[in-house]
C-alpha cells in the first residue's frame, strides 16, 4: 500500500477539498491546489513513465514546465485525450484520468525495457547507421521503428473543445511574477502605463512566495511575506491586468508575442461545457519585460535518471508549496549553495535528510553552517559515481574528487536513500529573450549565458538576467527599471535586505566516475535518452557544430527542448573540443517555449471556417441538381452533373455532346471581372495585353493575352469596350486577384501619369453562359427585346439589355467554339436568370455542364487554359499564338523578352496537338513524351497537358508541350507508360471546326 | 511581425501588407533599344543586402497603395516609409 507523504498543511493546498483521480487505472486522492505530480508524490509514487529509447523507468524530476520525464497521456481513448502533458503542470480535478506513455503492457513491466540491456548496441545515430542498407528494406524497417517509437497517442476523434484568439495591446508586458516581475509590473502600472502581467503557474510569486526563511529578508520580513504584501497591492492597481495559467509561447520582433491562456484545463470535464479551453493571446506591447526566472541544472553522473532523483529546487517546492515530502530518506547532491536552502526547508518541516554531498572542497556559507548544526553529515569534495534501484533509487555510491575534479580517488562509500535532490546551479531562462533577437554573452565565473544586447524596448530583470541572489535581484531590478522607464525613483530604492547565498560553485559538466565512460549512462537529455557518451561519440565521428551534434544525438530535441540538459551538452562539447563556451554559442531557441495544442493555434478556424470557400450566386441550384464540385482557387465550381447511375466519364460525354448538338449552360460567374475606366483606358490595355486595343469599337469584345515582363504567358480573357472610356476585363478564375494586383502595381509605380481606375467587380455579377446551335433561340426567349441577328449582334460583340426590369450585359463570346452568349446580371438575380434559361431551353434539352465539360469542349477547339497548358515557361510563340502578338506596338509588358536569345530558340517546348494511333486510347495528363525509347537515358521531349475522349469527334484528343514541336507536325512520338508504350502523332492543336463555322452558325 | 506605418493609413500589422521586392528599379522607357544583357539586368538582377535595403511594399489588405520602405534587414528595423515617386529620405 502506498504511504502518505503529505507532511503539513500548506496555504496553497485546500485540505478540506479532497479530489480523486485515476492514474494508470488506479484511484488516488489529492487536494485542490495539487498538481498531478505533487499528488502522486504525496502518495509516494515516483515511477510515472518510461524513457523514449531505452524504456528506462523514469519519475518526476521537476516542479514546472521544464519537466522532461513525467509526461503523461490524459483521458486516453476519449475525444479529449492529449499526449505529452507534463504531470508537473496539470492541476488535478475530480475525474482526471492520466496514464503513463511509452510503455507496454504497463509502466511497471515494460517489454521495451529490453532496449536498456541492448543499449551497448544502440549508440547515437544507431538508426541512421543500421537501417541504411539495403535501401529497399527501409519500408520493412520503418514499420517496426514507427511502432516502437512515439511519445503518446494523438487523438483520433474530433476535438470537442473550443479555442479562441484574442489581440491585446498594452504599454508594458511583464512575463513572470516572481519578485522581479512583481517589482516591474508595479513600477510600470504606478507610472500610469497600461500593464499586462503574465504568469504560467496558477498563482503569482514565483519561488520567492514560499521562501519562508530567516535567511532571506526584505525590510525585516521574510522575503515571502514581503512579496505577498506587494502582490496584494499589485492586484488592486486598475491599469494592471493579470493573467495566470498563461504561458508565453513565442516572442517575435517588434514586441509581438504569443501566449496561451489556459482557461479550463484545471476544471472537471463537466464544468468545461460551452467554455473556451485555451485562448491564444496575440500581444503587441510597447515595452516587454522578461522576468522569466531561471531553471535549475541537474548534475551529470552515472545513472542520474532513476525515479526518485529530482532537482533540489523541486524538492523544496513540493515541501514548501504543496506540503509534500518527496522521500523519507533524502540525500542532496550539489556543486553550489542551492541545496542548503532546500535542506533548511526540509529541516523546518521535519523531513529527514540522510546526507549532503557537496563537490566543493571548502564550501562556506551561513546556510551550510545552519544545516551542519542539525547534525547532518556533509561529504565535502565528494561526487556521486553511481546509483542503484531500478524503479526507485535506493542507494548511491560516492567517492572523493581529485583536486582537478577530473578523477575520483579513495574508496567508495555507499549510502542508502529513497530520494536524491541534485543541483548543478542555475540557468537563466533566456529563451524568449533570444527568440526575438536578443544576443547573449557567456559569463565565465558561474558559466551561464546571460542577456547582452537587447532589442529596443525590451528588458530582462531578475534571474533570467543572470541575477541569481536576492540582493542582486533587488538592486539590479530597481536600477534597470529606472533606466528603462526613465524615472527617478521606484518603491524599491531603499529596501533593507538580507541574502545568505554564497555564489561559489564548482562546475564540472560531466562528473568523473570509477568506470570508463563507455560503461556509464550519464544522461544529458532525459527525454531523448541522450548520454554524455553519445555526445562524445558524435564528436569522435567528426561532428563539430553544436547544431549538428544536437541533431545527431537528438539532445534537446524532445518536447521539453532540453531545458535541463542543453547547457551540459554544450559544456561537454566545449571541454572535449577545447573550444570556449562563449565561442561555441548555443543552439537556436525556437518557439514555442512549451508545446501548444493544434486547437490553440487554429482557434475558431475549424470545420467550415478552416478553409473558407466562395460560392457563386447560382451555387444552390447546382447543389439541388446534384452537381459534383471542384475547387478552383477558393471557389467551389460545378464540375459535372451526374444523372442516376452515371459515372464522371459518362456524365461528361453526355454534357459535351449536348452542348454541341443542341444547347448547354455553364455558370461562369467565377471568372475575374475588372471594371476599367478613364481617358487612358485604351492606352493602358495596349500596354498590358500583347495585341492592339486602340481600334476596338464600343460594343465589341476582344480576346487578350497578358504576359509577365519575362515574356511568359500570365493570364488571358475577353475584354469588352462598354463605353468610350470604359472596359470590362475578364480574367481566369484563379488569376483574378493576382491580375488586378499586377495592373495596380504598373498603374501606381510605372505609369502614374495614366488616367485609369480599376475596380474588381467579380462578385458583383453573375454570369450565365448559354452555348450550342440552339442557344440563340433560348436567349431570344429569355430576352425577347434583344435583336440577336448576326448583322446586329455578331460574334465578339456586346449589348446592354433588360430581362423584365433587370439590367443585363450580353456578350456573344465563346470558349467552346459553339455559338454562345454570356448573360451578366447583378449577382442576386443570377439564379433566377439561370432558371429562366433552363425553362426556355427545356424543349432544346438544355444541359447544364460543369468545368470538366468546359475543358473538354475548349480542348476540341485547341483553346488553352492558362495554368494547365502553360506553366511559367511558355511564351505566346511557344503556344503557336503568334497571331495575338502585335508587331506594330512599340511596347507592352513582356515584349522585349520575346526576342531574348533564350526565347527565340527553336527547340523550346511548344504546344501541339497529339492524336493516338488507337483512337480509343486516352492519354494520361502529365505523361512524358519521348521520340526514342532505345536511347539511354531516354530523352524527354515534353509532356501531355490536356487529354480527353471527344464524343463529338469520336476519338481521343490531347494537347501537349514538345521540344521543337512546331516543326514536328505529322511526326510519330511515344508516350511510355508503366505497362505499354503508346504511339501518338503530332497534330494541329485545333481538332474541331478549324473554319469557325459553328461560332457564326 | 512588423508594425508598418503605411504612408496613407498609419500603423498597421504586417499581415495587411505584401512585400514587393527591391525599390527604385525603373522600367526602361524604351525596352526595344536595349541589348539582351541590359534587359536582363532590369529583369533579373536584384540586390540582397544584409543591412539597409530599399523595398517596395503594398498595403494589399488595406488601401491597396504601393509605397517604399527603407529597412535594415539585419534587425528588421524600419528606418522610413515614403510614397511612390518621392525621393528617399536621408537616414
Image (cartoon, helix red, strand yellow):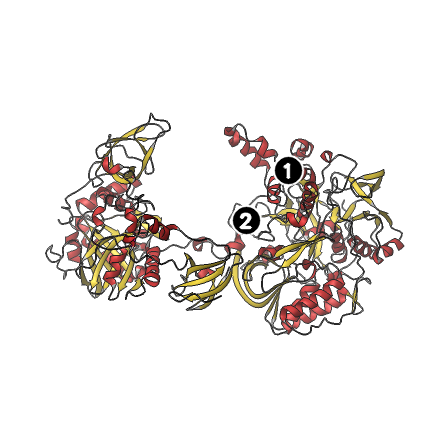
Numbered label attached to residue A79: 2
State the image coordinates of residue A330 (x, y, percent, origin top left).
81, 48
State whether the magenta stretch is mostly helix, strand or loop: loop
Q: Are marks 2 and 1 on the same chain?
A: yes
Q: Which residues are magenta?
A: A888-894
Name the residue beneath numbered marker 1: A538
Left or right for A738, reference A561: left
In which quadrant of the rendered image does the N terminus of chain A lie?
A: top right
The image shows residue A977 at horizontal and vertical percentages of 34, 30
Secondary structure beneath disc 1? helix
| Residue occupying image coordinates x 72% and y 70% | A492
Q: Quadrant of residue A984?
A: top left
The numbered mark, 2 or 1, whose residue comes first in the sequence reads 2
Q: Is residue B27 above or below residue A656?
A: below
- Closer to viewer: mark 2 or mark 1: 1
- The alpha-carbon separation of the residues under discs 2 and 1 comes to 42 Å
Q: Chain of mark 1?
A: A
For this rendering, which residue is in front, A860 or A479?
A479
Q: Residue at x 69, y 68 (%)?
A: A479
Amino acid at each position: 500500500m502506498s504511504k502518505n507523504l503529505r507532511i503539513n498543511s500548506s496555504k496553497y493546498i485546500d485540505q478540506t477539498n479532497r479530489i480523486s483521480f485515476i492514474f494508470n487505472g488506479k484511484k488516488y486522492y489529492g487536494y485542490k491546489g495539487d498538481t498531478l505530480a505533487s499528488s502522486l508524490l504525496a502518495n509516494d509514487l515516483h515511477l510515472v513513465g518510461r524513457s523514449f529509447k531505452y524504456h528506462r523507468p523514469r519519475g518526476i524530476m521537476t516542479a514546472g514546465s521544464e519537466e522532461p520525464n513525467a509526461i503523461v497521456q490524459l483521458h486516453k481513448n476519449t475525444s479529449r485525450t492529449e499526449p505529452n502533458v507534463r504531470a508537473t503542470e496539470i492541476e488535478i480535478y475530480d475525474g482526471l484520468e492520466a496514464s503513463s506513455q511509452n510503455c507496454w503492457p504497463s509502466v511497471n513491466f515494460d517489454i521495451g525495457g529490453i532496449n536498456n540491456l541492448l543499449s551497448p548496441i544502440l549508440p547515437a545515430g544507431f538508426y541512421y547507421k543500421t537501417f541504411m542498407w539495403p535501401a529497399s528494406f527501409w519500408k520493412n524497417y520503418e514499420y517496426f521503428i514507427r511502432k516502437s517509437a512515439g511519445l503518446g497517442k494523438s487523438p483520433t476523434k474530433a476535438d470537442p473543445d473550443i479555442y479562441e484568439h484574442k489581440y491585446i495591446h498594452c504599454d508594458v508586458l511583464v512575463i513572470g511574477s516572481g519578485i522581479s516581475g512583481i517589482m516591474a509590473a508595479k513600477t510600470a502600472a504606478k507610472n500610469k502605463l497600461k500593464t499586462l502581467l503574465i504568469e504560467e503557474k496558477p498563482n503569482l510569486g514565483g519561488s520567492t512566495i514560499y521562501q519562508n526563511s530567516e535567511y532571506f529578508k526584505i525590510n525585516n520580513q521574510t522575503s515571502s511575506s514581503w512579496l505577498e504584501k506587494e502582490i496584494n497591492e499589485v492586484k488592486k492597481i486598475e491599469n494592471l491586468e493579470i493573467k495566470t495559467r498563461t504561458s508565453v509561447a513565442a516572442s517575435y520582433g517588434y514586441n509581438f508575442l504569443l501566449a496561451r491562456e489556459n482557461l479550463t484545463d484545471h476544471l472537471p470535464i463537466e464544468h468545461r461545457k460551452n467554455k473556451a479551453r485555451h485562448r491564444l493571446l496575440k500581444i503587441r506591447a510597447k515595452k516587454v519585460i522578461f522576468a522569466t526566472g531561471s531553471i535549475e541544472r541537474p548534475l551529470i553522473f552515472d545513472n542520474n535518471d532513476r525515479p526518485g532523483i529530482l532537482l533540489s529546487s523541486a524538492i523544496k517546492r513540493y515541501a514548501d508549496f504543496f506540503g509534500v515530502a518527496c522521500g523519507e530518506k533524502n540525500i542532496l547532491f550539489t556543486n553550489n549553495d542551492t541545496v542548503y536552502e532546500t535542506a533548511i526547508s526540509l529541516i523546518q518541516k521535519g523531513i529527514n535528510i540522510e546526507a549532503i554531498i557537496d563537490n566543493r572542497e571548502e564550501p562556506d556559507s551561513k546556510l551550510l553552517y545552519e544545516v551542519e548544526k542539525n547534525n547532518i553529515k556533509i561529504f565535502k569534495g565528494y561526487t556521486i559515481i553511481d546509483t542503484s534501484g531500478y524503479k526507485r533509487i535506493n542507494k548511491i555510491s560516492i567517492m572523493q574528487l581529485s583536486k582537478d575534479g577530473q578523477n575520483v580517488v579513495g574508496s567508495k562509500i555507499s549510502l542508502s536513500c529513497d530520494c536524491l535532490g541534485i543541483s548543478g546551479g542555475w540557468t537563466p531562462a533566456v529563451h524568449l529573450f533570444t527568440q526575438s533577437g536578443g544576443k547573449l554573452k557567456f559569463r565565465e565565473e558561474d558559466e551561464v549565458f546571460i542577456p547582452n544586447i537587447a532589442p529596443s524596448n525590451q528588458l530582462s530583470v531578475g534571474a533570467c538576467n543572470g541575477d541569481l541572489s536576492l540582493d542582486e535581484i533587488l538592486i539590479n531590478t530597481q536600477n534597470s527599471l529606472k533606466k528603462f522607464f526613465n524615472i527617478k525613483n521606484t518603491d524599491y530604492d531603499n529596501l533593507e535586505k538580507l541574502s545568505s547565498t554564497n555564489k561559489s560553485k564548482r562546475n564540472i559538466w560531466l562528473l568523473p566516475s570509477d568506470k570508463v565512460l563507455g560503461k556509464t549512462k550519464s544522461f544529458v537529455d532525459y527525454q531523448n535518452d541522450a548520454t554524455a557518451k553519445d555526445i562524445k561519440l558524435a564528436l569522435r565521428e567528426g561532428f563539430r557544430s553544436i547544431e549538428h551534434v544536437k541533431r545527431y544525438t537528438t539532445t534537446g530535441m524532445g518536447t521539453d527542448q532540453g531545458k535541463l540538459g542543453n547547457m551540459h551538452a554544450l559544456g561537454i562539447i566545449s571541454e572535449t573540443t577545447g573550444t570556449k563556451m562563449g565561442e561555441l554559442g548555443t543552439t537556436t531557441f525556437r518557439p514555442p517555449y512549451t508545446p501548444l495544442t493544434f486547437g490553440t493555434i487554429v482557434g475558431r478556424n475549424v470545420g467550415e471556417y478552416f478553409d473558407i470557400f466562395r460560392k457563386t450566386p447560382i451555387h444552390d441550384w447546382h447543389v439541388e441538381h446534384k452537381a459534383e464540385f471542384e475547387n478552383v482557387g477558393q471557389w467551389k465550381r460545378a464540375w459535372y452533373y451526374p444523372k442516376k447511375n452515371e459515372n464522371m466519364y459518362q456524365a461528361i460525354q453526355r454534357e459535351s455532346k449536348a452542348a454541341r448538338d443542341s444547347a448547354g449552360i455553364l455558370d461562369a460567374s467565377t471568372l475575374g471581372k475588372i471594371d476599367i475606366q478613364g481617358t487612358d483606358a485604351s492606352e493602358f490595355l495596349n500596354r498590358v495585353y500583347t495585341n492592339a486595343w486602340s481600334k476596338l469599337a464600343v460594343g465589341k469584345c476582344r480576346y487578350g493575352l497578358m504576359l509577365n515582363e519575362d515574356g511568359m504567358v500570365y493570364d488571358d480573357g475577353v475584354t469588352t469596350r462598354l463605353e468610350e472610356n470604359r472596359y470590362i476585363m475578364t480574367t481566369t478564375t484563379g488569376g483574378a486577384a493576382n491580375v488586378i494586383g499586377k495592373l495596380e502595381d504598373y498603374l501606381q509605380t510605372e505609369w502614374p501619369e495614366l488616367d485609369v481606375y480599376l475596380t474588381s467587380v467579380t462578385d458583383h455579377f453573375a454570369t450565365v453562359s448559354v452555348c450550342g446551335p440552339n442557344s440563340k433561340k433560348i436567349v431570344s426567349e429569355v430576352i425577347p427585346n434583344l435583336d440577336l441577328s448576326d448583322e446586329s449582334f455578331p460574334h465578339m460583340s456586346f449589348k446592354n439589355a433588360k430581362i423584365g426590369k433587370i439590367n443585363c450585359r450580353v456578350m456573344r463570346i465563346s470558349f467552346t467554339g459553339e455559338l454562345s452568349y454570356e448573360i451578366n446580371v447583378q449577382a442576386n438575380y443570377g439564379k433566377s436568370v439561370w432558371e429562366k434559361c433552363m425553362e426556355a431551353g427545356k424543349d432544346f434539352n438544355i444541359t447544364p455542364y460543369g468545368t470538366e465539360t468546359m475543358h473538354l469542349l475548349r480542348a476540341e477547339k485547341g483553346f488553352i487554359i492558362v495554368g494547365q497548358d502553360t506553366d511559367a515557361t511558355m511564351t505566346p510563340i511557344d503556344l503557336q499564338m503568334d497571331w495575338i502578338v502585335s508587331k506594330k506596338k512599340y511596347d507592352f509588358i513582356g515584349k522585349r523578352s520575346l526576342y531574348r536569345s533564350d526565347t527565340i530558340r527553336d527547340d523550346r517546348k511548344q504546344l501541339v496537338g497529339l492524336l493516338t494511333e488507337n483512337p480509343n486510347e486516352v492519354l494520361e495528363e502529365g505523361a512524358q513524351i519521348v521520340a526514342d525509347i532505345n536511347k539511354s537515358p531516354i530523352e524527354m521531349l515534353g509532356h501531355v497537358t490536356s487529354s480527353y475522349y471527344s464524343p463529338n469527334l469520336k476519338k481521343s484528343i490531347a494537347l501537349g508541350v514538345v521540344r521543337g514541336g512546331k516543326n514536328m507536325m505529322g511526326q510519330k512520338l511515344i508516350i511510355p507508360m508503366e505497362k505499354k508504350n503508346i504511339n501518338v502523332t503530332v497534330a494541329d492543336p485545333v481538332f474541331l471546326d478549324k473554319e469557325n463555322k459553328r461560332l457564326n452558325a | 511581425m512588423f508594425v508598418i506605418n503605411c504612408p496613407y493609413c498609419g500603423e498597421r500589422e504586417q499581415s495587411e501588407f505584401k512585400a514587393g521586392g527591391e525599390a527604385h528599379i525603373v522600367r526602361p522607357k524604351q525596352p526595344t533599344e536595349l541589348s539582351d544583357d541590359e534587359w536582363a539586368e532590369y529583369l533579373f538582377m536584384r540586390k540582397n543586402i544584409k543591412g539597409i535595403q530599399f523595398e517596395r511594399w503594398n498595403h494589399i489588405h488595406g488601401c491597396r497603395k504601393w509605397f517604399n520602405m527603407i529597412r535594415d534587414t539585419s534587425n528588421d528595423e524600419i528606418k522610413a516609409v515614403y510614397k511612390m515617386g518621392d525621393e528617399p529620405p536621408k537616414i
